[in-house]
Amino acid sequence: MSDARFTYIGGPTALIELAGFRFLTDPTLDPAGTDYPTAAYTLHKTQSPAVAAESLGAIDAVLLSHDHHFDNLDHAGRAALASAGAVFTTQLSAHRLGGNAFGLAPWESRALRSAQGRELTVTATPARHGPANGDRGPVVGFVLQSAAADDPVTYVSGDTVWYEGVAEVGKRFDVDVAVLNLGAARVAVAGPHDLTFSADDAVTLARAWPRATIVPLHYEGWTHFTQGRAEVSAAFAAAGLSDRIRWPVAGEPTTLG
């Protein structure tokens, strides 16, 4: 039986334990109330991490969708990268970060082997951070696939909308668990366009990938998210798919699969 676990930390950040490896997604570890001014807008964080950075324990790899937006990599999250075994991210982000960061192009894979001899492959997946004519990327998603048949094939979307690149993931992998960055994020400089999965996007994915359990991320904790749990729950209920979604409880490990 698989020992895969998922612990929601807040925003887009979660700890995924799979095949003996420990992965951290898009680290946002600053306290609630922090502001992040940029030349075009200011992001505001409203949620502190459910698990403090110093309590995370050893991280084998960070799955970083991109490094250039604070709601995916804040100050404390950036400081935590150096202590991870590796950081998998876009090629451009890896160039900026240096150190232990490895840039992956879509469909490029890295094989991992634990000290106990367990094996897992990390495959980068296509992602588009907004409309086709207003992509805020580059960004990347990931598929985690263990050599053990009872471990769930796990998709981590990163910041993306539903489009043909994401649809292709479901054609290449039989996904058991889809961890989705929701929230229908918007910023004024990008106009009236969703930059991450909307509730309707998530329903579309759930219908296209009928085996996948949907695990939401990135739906609370920042003021530029335009949809939260209520909107996502209502969309899944209207589609008759409420049994497909699993809402994590912050700070509490739950089994995957």
Image (cartoon, helix red, strand yellow):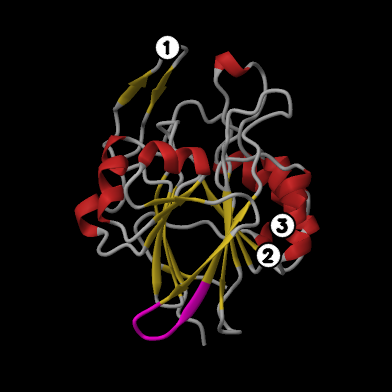
* 162 displayed left or right of 101: right
Asked if the stretch drawn in magenta spans residue 117, the answer is yes
Q: Is residue 219 above or below residue 135?
A: below
Alpha carbon separation for disc pair 3 and 2 = 12 Å
User: Which percent across, then down, holds residue 49?
Assistant: 31, 46
Q: Number of numbered discs present?
A: 3
Q: Indicate the quadrant where residue 231 lies.
A: top right
User: Which percent across, then down, holds residue 215?
Assistant: 56, 57
Alpha carbon separation for disc pair 1 and 3 = 35 Å
Q: Is residue 2 above or below residue 212?
A: below
* 109 displayed left or right of 113: right
Residue 167 visible in the current orientation: yes
Where are the magenta residues, as a range? 114-120
Label 3, secondary structure: give it: helix
Judge by depth and name the residue closer to the eye, 109 or 172: 109
Alpha carbon separation for disc pair 2 and 1 = 39 Å
Judge by depth and name the residue closer to the eye, 255 or 28: 28
Where does label 2 land, which residue?
212
User: Which percent across, then down, holds residue 83?
Assistant: 25, 55
Judge by depth and name the residue closer to the eye, 54 or 96: 96
For marks 2 and 1 on the same chain, the one whose residue lies earlier in the sequence: 1
Where does label 1 land, which residue?
39
How crowded is the residue under tag 1: few (<14 C-alpha within 10 Å), some, or many (20+)? few
Q: Which residue is rendered at x = 55% and y = 78% of the image? A: 151
Three-letter amino acid code at the position of disc 2? Ala
Three-letter amino acid code at the position of disc 3? Val
* 243 displayed left or right of 83: right
